[in-house]
Amino acid sequence: MLIWRGAVLLVLGVVALGMLATPAFADDKFGSALCTQNPYPGCELFAGNNGAAPRPEEGPGPSGGGRAASPAPGDRALDAPSLPIADCAYVRSDFQPPAPGLQAVAYRPPAAGGLVVRPAVFRPSELSVRLVASQPGQGAGAWYVYRCTSGGEQDALYRAPVWIPDAAAAPAPDPEALAEQARNQLRLPGPQIVMNPSVDQLVGLPTWLWLDATGWNQVAATAAAGGVSVTAVAKPVQVTWSLGDGGTVTCSGPGTPFPDGADPKSASPDCGYTYRHRSLDTPGGTFAVTATVRWDVTWAGAGQAGAFPGLTTVSTTVARVIDVPALTTGGG
């Protein structure tokens, strides 16, 4: 215990002498003492300037006198400024392997759960090597070497040349298959039925039948692939009318509209029908009238041509047929 007290008094004396020999500590100075008894009695002294720059009077004077300024303590940034990454990728080349030859390498995805070895700088988004399906001598292809094409930090890792087979030329598309696609793309309008008289048809009086002319035009569609195109064309050729009383009429065209001011007893020049029975005696009191248009479909393209079975479009309406005694009996 006497030794411990003596050590403490000794340290305090040294600190006191230091304070008498130097000016008092400024705000940027510090000093402390750490004393311990284990493993043996003793003290450690600490003094510093809290990382501040040396005082002007501590630097060398005009004549070179004075104390040399010491560098301020603290960490220094040793990292080099960041550099741009070079644009590097595998490119096709005229590389030829030296004798006795060079075994091609290939990128293969690692097996699930297996060991994955990656280069020091691994950027999956920049991987440009395709899976190698063949080796040199097993088909057309070329060697690809790893090159950097722009300025920046060079990739110091060595990458061996890679043999990549040429992509096999895709077979020319079949014109008939394209024609089938074009036919499926045809959008044929439904026939729009028009009849005269426009309200009730009369027993014994000619009925004019026709279709709206805007729906009687050819329709085309094109399918293309691999530089080959084929066009399918559908053309309306005839319309078959079912008048609902068991009678039918086939016309080679859309029919002729009834002219304004024409004689009601006149017949259509190309597509008409005359009812012999009234519809009032049937369930519902009307006849179902159906118009079915047949379309011829042909195709051409790639130096070839052909035809498909005809297509049809159908529309239906109803007609009420009444009788007028003066017409049916021939009276005035």
Image (tube, helix red, strand yellow):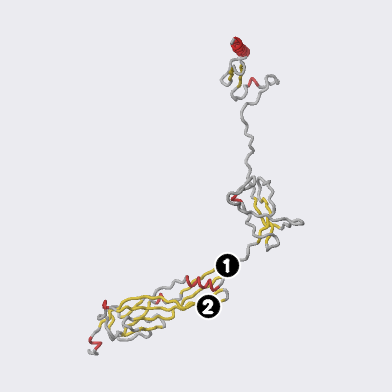
Q: Secondary structure at mark 1?
A: loop
Q: Mark 2 belongs to which amino acid?
A: Gly
Q: Could you tell me residue 63's position as x and y percent?
A: 70, 20
Q: Residue furthest bottom?
A: 330
Q: Is residue 210 left or right of residue 67?
A: left
Q: Position of residue 109 (x, y in %)?
A: 60, 53
**Rendered view: 191 above or below 51:** below
Q: Is residue 96 above or below residue 271?
A: above
Q: Quadrant of residue 165?
A: bottom right
How many residues crowd around disc 2 within 10 Å: few (fewer than 14), some, or many (20 or more)?
Answer: few
Image location (x, y in percent) of residue 162: 68, 55
Residue 36 picture location, percent across and down: 59, 17
Distance from label 1 to label 2 (Cα)? 20 Å
Mark toward the start of the polypeptide (1 vs 2): 1
At horizontal 63% and vertical 57% (from top left) the residue drawn is 131
Seen at 44% across and 80% down, the residue is 237
Helix, strand or loop at mark 2: strand
What mark, if any, has residue 143 been given in the picture?
none
Mark carried by residue 306: 2
> Dividing the image into 4 quarters, which one contains the N terminus?
top right
Towards the viewer: 52 or 99? 99
Q: Between 189 and 111, which is closer to the camera in this rendering?
A: 111
* Residue highlighted by disc 1: 226
Classify residue 191 as left or right of residue 229.
left
Dot 1 and dot 2 residues touching (CB under 8 Å): no
Q: Is residue 248 above or below residue 168?
A: below
- Residue 16 visible here: no
Neighbours of disc 1 within 10 Å: few (<14), some (14-19), many (20+): few
- The amino acid type, in three-letter code, at marker 1 is Gly
Name the residue: 60% across, 52% down.
111
Q: Quadrant of residue 92?
A: bottom right
